[in-house]
Image (cartoon, helix red, strand yellow):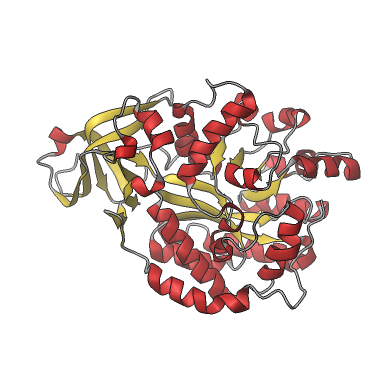
């Protein structure tokens, strides 16, 4: 290690690590040394005891984990939390969400993004993949608050070519922003709202500019059945026909992926990943869930997600991790699948890979970016600890996260947010809500008809 002072030393904690075969393990009484935003060493607390550091965090009784990644969300939609409840998917979109979204202003998006980032930081999320409108405003919030984000400006074909052009302009203009903490993607909404011609054009733009693509596809089985009836193709087959499976592709949900789709997903020309957001599927009473086991068998990483808070009501990836494990056991009829260590793998390395950052985050190891969360396991609901992985997945809560660090910068310390003023955001957002949620105009930004 360098003789000059480290920027940060986190010491006395138990560190979640991955071995050479990517199996989850834990190092007790350990320390993490951070320099210039990256992890320089994971060592023993004794070895780091006399190491000079600009900042030191004593973390006895806490577990240091890679920061969680929310692999698919619509962060500004926290402004719509609880607005559209107990509705089928079609009514949820057509009667509430898409009429309200026709009112969106840049200020609404900014305030929603600030509130969402605060919620995610407090829940141990250090990186999120966002798919929404006015994305340049979200990028500004990310830059200011210190998070990491994978951002895409969403578009529908109903916007004309301008929507696709704006998505490209954003992706090129903000790629690598915030000191490298922002990565970007092209973001067509879905095969049922974007024409084959626009999907093909998006794939061509992605290849020409070296950009990934983030979209919804095969969200549920109804969409797959409707696509088969109308086009003779599943949504995944539409992605293949339009060339999107030859790009680096992040697919949201995938609960409608069926067996005939798997050979296509196994031999894609790019890096294909799927984001699963199980709480929303339960709320909408969808009969299926993301086929994690089948996707894992063909080498497709599945990252954890929440979707937007308008459908999920929270941005709690901790809950997504627990639900993914439980629902997969039920769906497969096998209590040995998904194990707690497998769930932690999906929450860390697989989620990092899903957003194209598998080489820089997702594990606490030398050379990786210092995206670290400290989890306090001293509460009565997490004691005693017989199996640390099980405690983290099934007993710990997002509120047990004490400290959140991104690129070596402490964004929350001992539950105190350091980069966002939540009361001020809530006051201003409350003043804007009447205009935002007004549906008397009869407009909607799109029609849901799958």
Q: Look at 40% across and 66% down and name the residue there.
A: 144
Instruction: Evaluate whether residue 306 shows in this view.
Output: yes
Residue 352 position in % (x across, y down)? 48, 41
Answer with left or right where residue 216 lies relative to residue 403: right
Residue for point 49% across, 54% down: 149
Outermost residue on the left side: it is 50
Quarter residue 188 falls in: bottom right
Camera-side residue: 237 or 270? 237
Classify residue 84 by image quadrant. Answer: bottom right
Q: Residue at x 78, y 61 (%)?
A: 157
Instruction: Locate residue 312, reporting x and y percent.
Output: 58, 52
With 273 as the anchor, is 194 left or right in this view?
A: right
Give the x, y percent position of residue 449. Answer: 82, 55
| Position of residue 405 in the picture relative to residue 44 (left or right) | right
> Front-most of 146 and 341?
341
Q: Taking the image as drawn, is residue 276 in sight?
A: no
Relative to 256, 152 lies left or right: left
Query: Quadrant location of the N terminus?
Result: top left
Q: Name the spot of residue 317 as percent of width and height, x first.
A: 48, 46
Q: Is residue 227 above or below residue 335?
A: below
Tell which of 210 and 300 is nearer to you: 300
Q: As displayed, is residue 170 above or below residue 324?
A: below
């Amino acid at each position: 290690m360098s003789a000059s002072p480290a920027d940060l030393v986190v010491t006395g904690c138990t560190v979640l690590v991955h071995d050479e075969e990517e199996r989850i393990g834990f190092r007790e009484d350990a320390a993490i040394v951070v320099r210039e935003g990256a992890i320089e060493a994971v060592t023993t607390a004794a070895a780091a005891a006399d190491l000079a550091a600009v900042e030191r965090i004593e973390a006895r009784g806490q577990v240091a984990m890679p920061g969680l990644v929310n692999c698919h969300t619509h962060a500004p939609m926290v402004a719509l939390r609880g607005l559209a409840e107990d509705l089928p998917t079609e009514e949820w979109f057509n009667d509430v969400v898409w009429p309200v979204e026709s009112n969106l202003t840049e200020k609404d998006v900014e305030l929603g993004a600030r509130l969402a980032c605060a919620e995610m930081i407090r829940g141990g999320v250090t990186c999120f993949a966002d798919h929404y409108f006015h994305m340049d405003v979200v990028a500004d919030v990310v830059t200011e608050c210190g998070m990491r984000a994978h951002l895409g400006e969403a578009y529908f074909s109903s916007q004309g070519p301008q929507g696709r052009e704006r998505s490209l302009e954003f992706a090129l203009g903000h790629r690598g922003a915030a000191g490298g903490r922002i990565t970007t993607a092209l973001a067509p909404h879905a095969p049922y709202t974007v024409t084959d011609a626009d999907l093909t054009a998006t794939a061509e733009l992605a290849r020409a500019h070296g950009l990934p693509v983030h979209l919804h596809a095969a969200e549920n089985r109804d969409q797959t059945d409707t696509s088969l009836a109308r086009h003779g193709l599943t949504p995944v087959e539409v992605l293949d026909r339009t060339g999107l499976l030859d790009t680096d592709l992040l697919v949201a949900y995938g609960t409608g992926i069926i067996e005939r789709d798997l050979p296509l997903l196994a031999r894609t020309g790019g890096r294909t990943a799927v984001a699963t957001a199980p709480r929303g599927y339960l709320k909408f009473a969808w009969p299926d869930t993301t086929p994690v086991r089948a996707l894992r068998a063909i080498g497709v990483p599945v990252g954890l997600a929440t979707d937007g808070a308008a459908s999920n009501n929270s941005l709690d990836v901790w809950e997504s991790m627990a639900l993914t494990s439980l629902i997969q056991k039920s769906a497969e009829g096998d209590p040995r699948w998904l194990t707690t260590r497998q769930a932690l793998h999906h929450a860390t390395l697989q989620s990092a890979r899903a957003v194209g950052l598998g080489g820089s985050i997702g594990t606490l190891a030398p050379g990786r970016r210092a995206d670290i969360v400290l989890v306090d396991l001293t509460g009565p609901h997490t004691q005693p600890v017989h199996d640390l992985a099980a405690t983290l997945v099934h007993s710990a809560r997002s509120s047990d996260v004490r400290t959140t660090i991104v690129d070596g910068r402490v964004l929350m310390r001992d539950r105190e947010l350091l980069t966002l003023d939540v009361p001020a955001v809530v006051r201003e957002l409350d003043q804007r809500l009447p205009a935002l949620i007004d549906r008397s105009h009869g407009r909607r930004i799109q029609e849901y008809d799958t």
